[in-house]
């Protein structure tokens, strides 16, 4: 018996669930968990089905599903468990460390193939944990040069996702297009509040009583990509900028790791500029 | 087009979802939202399906579903939106008020038919909001007499649920049996911590940093019924028993109202001494 | 023995606490709880002292304190427990109801003298609970006329605070100046996210995973006044605008009532565009 | 200018704050932040004062403070910032890793001198991060022998605190006495719920909707020591024991690290079987 996760999205119409489950029953697949969502204004259907069955390869099943679904259907059959990722960092350790620790103890749900940094600060720690570290400085380089260097490294690996774990450079539209839907970022504010630079200073100046963080897929529009997870934490008048940054880091790593867990378990669909998350 | 919520539970087996959705498709019902859960250790299957379709009565649909399901299947087709409830209270107002306010402004998802209290304190407020108040004192009565009086009142109404909104008398096994699966209680602690009397004093004595509340269905075993919702809130050394009670009341009403909303939307299954809640 | 709450703010300097507590000790006042905060960048000192002592009037104590403090010191000695408030509403009931219920059962920490609404919807409910309701329509009136009418009513009462409990009209700078530091508003978003109209629609369009609410003092700049309390709650792809509004209302009332409790207990200082909250 | 944190506890009486602050003012110390709490039922006074001043040693100041306080006063003047700790583990990595990462990047507020484990599993990771690892098996040893071995190692270091980071052996009364007030434990449940073994299995069996964790000082009575911090997180019917354990680990490390931060900043007083935490 193998486990299979099936992700399907298509235009909504009557009978989709019947069609899908009939195909699965015909092939003797047993549904363990099923989630579906219809975006009614946009007539879009999404489902995630976890099932078990006996199979050697899934091409025939995929074909059968496509035959029974609208023409625009996307069917994704996922058998391999472990995703491969490359992590990009600048100088802050907290998100990277959380990822590398879980990687080290095999609880990340993914395998970290490499870390790329535009500073050298995090090399020592990364290498201690046995992960290759690539240093690409942005200094004295045009953005396109800088990004070409990074792409060169990334393309040595067959990564499912690029994780920006506090990578503090803005990526170009071209770069983003090359890895569309595969780049996950942690933003150090509760978006859409405090877009742009120095969110904790902005939060301090405004005198907010809550700060937060946002994990999102990266698109062309900075800070505008589909949001995956968000959390907040209370602050008060005793918090200066430094204390907000410290509290913020705890939220940032929590939010990013929660998003990664959902992504690695194939629980996240992108639907326009939003996400559907089948927790 | 009518809306229909379908609740089904039965022994788990391969093909259940297909069988169910095929019957629905045959009858031209369109699934809006579907949730299912399999309790694997107990081989039990649960599903909640919200759908739309054209129908006058649902007997034929129910029959068809039962034909296609295991013998132990329970099928519940729910068309009427509004539940009818009777509320039992003692002297504390906070849960009752929250219920009556939402009832008043038609946002409760249910209709309060009557309030029964073993003290007179809450009569004035209840009647101001136009709800009949029945006083049944427990003083100088045997428990069976007391409960018979209450039952007499309840049975004047065709209530779907009895809500114990800080009703501070323990109900007998006989009483509970008469309304099995229909009695919802709010317990003033985070169960199973602080079972029994004076949970806030217990919490104070123990020096906990969190207090909570629990909404549960009532069964024979006091404080042991299936839990529906729980929440907690932080307390600190500045909280005496009085402050804990005050903070606790906010949590109690939040927890109870959240549970009621879930129940009134038919999102809660009882599964042994646990619940399945399809949020 | 009487209880006294002392609020002091002034330029920070060495020895302030000693000076203050020496005066209190001389007058045989016993400190029950004391909180202090120094805004170091702005060299500003704030303290809240709860104490008990024997006194008939507090003028002499205030004089003695002022003699021992910098010239810019503000000293506020508060003996009466109950604040007087006027509530302004439009059509939404949830915040008003929470206030009136607590007022009814004497747990608000303040006394509601009147409710003013620019619609008639909430009259019935307000009057049922014995509170006078004043209707001032904004229709066919200049803003100044509308506000003059409201002021006329407010000025019949000696209110400590005006509570905007989902009052959906923007108040003029002149109006705000007349009640400077006395107007509390609940804003239906987690400020500074979603400033302006229809925050829940904005939140839905952006696809956020959290919504929130903000209680703040009202100043000239709309949505820019000093924030008192904020809370957030999780939402997901199942939430349309309607569901966000519903969840938002629960947060709004929680946030507003928490802010009011803090204000009524004299725990909130305004410090420029921020607040200091001694919880 | 040096920074000094002053912790004082004694029997409560009128004038304590005046006496203390007068001594500080005489010595030209400037109070930055001050917190005080009176446990009224027990007539106990606690204060934490952060101040700055010019001094070479603090003996004279301490003497002066003691002269002006009740006989039972405990005065603790803390100048050194960094605490020294020894960590005890069994086989679970999550709490240890969080501690060692913060230690590595100098954000723990303490210095990890050694890790002691009753299994070898965590040696590799610990040593990678440059911390000595000592293995003491409990197998084939009497408890006293086992503990003597551990004490021998601990006593090589001058540790301020012993942190039980998922150390799964129960320590004897004798051991606890030797390090009274210095042992911090993370308990994998929301105490007092699920005392004893397998709390996540207990939680699963009971069908709770929330799980939590508790950091506490260790005393003779297992799971009964003064609680420092607690947090909870929501679970639902989809969580089996395994998923509860996974979610629980995230809470455990959050709770433990929060407690350690508070302890290392000298914000925690033990008051009988409770704590006072000046956040």
Image (tube, coloured by chain):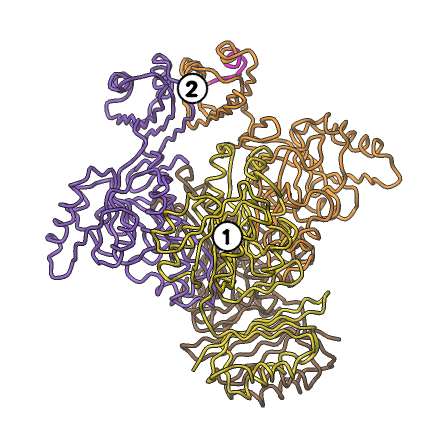
Chain colours: A orange, B purple, C yellow, D brown
Which residue, given by chain and number where applicable, does mark 2 sit on?
Answer: A29
Taking the image as shown, residue B69 lies to the left or right of residue D116, namely: left
Q: Is mark 1 on a helix, strand or loop?
A: helix
Of D177 and C276, the residue lying toward us: C276
Taking the image as shown, residue C209 lies to the left or right of residue D227, namely: right
> As drawn, which residue projects farthest toward the top?
A67
Residue A193 in the image: x percent, y percent? 64, 44
> As drawn, which residue projects farthest toward the right?
A140
C251 relative to B80, above or below: below
The numbered mark 2 sits on a residue in which chain?
A
Residue D208 in the image: x percent, y percent? 37, 46
Q: Do marks 2 and 1 share a chain?
A: no
Residue B25 in the image: x percent, y percent? 38, 14
| Residue at 77%, 27% in the rendered image | A174
Tell me the CA gap for discs 2 and 1.
49 Å
| Residue at 61%, 26% in the rendered image | A272
Residue B82 in the image: x percent, y percent? 31, 34
D223 relative to A166, above or below: below
- Which dot marks residue C255? 1
Of C62 and C167, the residue lying toward us: C167
Question: Total label count?
Answer: 2
Taking the image as shown, residue D193 lies to the left or right of residue C204, namely: left
Regarding residue C80, the answer to whether it shows in the image is yes
Which residues are drawn in magenta? A55-63
Residues packed near mark 1 inside 10 Å, few (<14), some (14 to 19) or many (20 plus)? many
The numbered mark 1 sits on a residue in which chain?
C
C184 relative to D36, above or below: above
Of C172 and D82, the residue lying toward us: C172
């Amino acid at each position: 018996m193998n486990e299979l996760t099936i992700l399907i999205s298509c235009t909504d119409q009557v009978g989709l669930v019947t069609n899908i489950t009939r195909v699965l029953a015909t092939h003797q697949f047993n549904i363990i968990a099923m989630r579906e969502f219809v975006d009614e204004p946009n007539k879009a259907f999404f489902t995630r089905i976890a099932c078990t069955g006996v199979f050697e390869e899934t091409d025939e099943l995929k074909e059968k599903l496509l035959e029974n679904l609208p023409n625009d259907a996307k069917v994704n059959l996922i058998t391999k468990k472990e995703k491969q990722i490359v992590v990009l960092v600048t100088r802050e350790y907290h998100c990277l460390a959380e990822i590398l620790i879980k990687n080290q103890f095999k609880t990340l749900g993914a395998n970290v193939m490499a870390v790329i940094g535009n500073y050298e600060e995090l090399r020592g720690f990364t290498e201690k944990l046995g992960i290759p570290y690539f240093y690409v400085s942005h200094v004295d380089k045009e953005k396109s040069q800088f990004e070409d260097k990074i792409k060169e490294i990334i393309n040595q690996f067959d990564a499912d996702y690029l994780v920006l774990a506090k990578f503090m450079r803005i990526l170009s539209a071209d770069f983003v297009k090359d890895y569309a839907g595969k780049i996950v970022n942690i933003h150090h504010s509760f978006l859409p509040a405090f877009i742009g630079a120095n969110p904790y200073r902005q939060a301090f100046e405004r005198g907010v009583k809550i700060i937060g963080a946002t994990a999102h897929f990266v698109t062309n529009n900075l800070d505008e990509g589909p949001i995956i997870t968000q959390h907040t934490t209370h602050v008060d008048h005793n918090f200066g900028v430094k204390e907000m940054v410290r509290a913020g880091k705890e939220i940032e790593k929590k939010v990013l790791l929660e998003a990664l867990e959902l992504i690695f378990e194939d629980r996240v669909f992108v639907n326009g500029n939003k996400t559907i998350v089948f927790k």
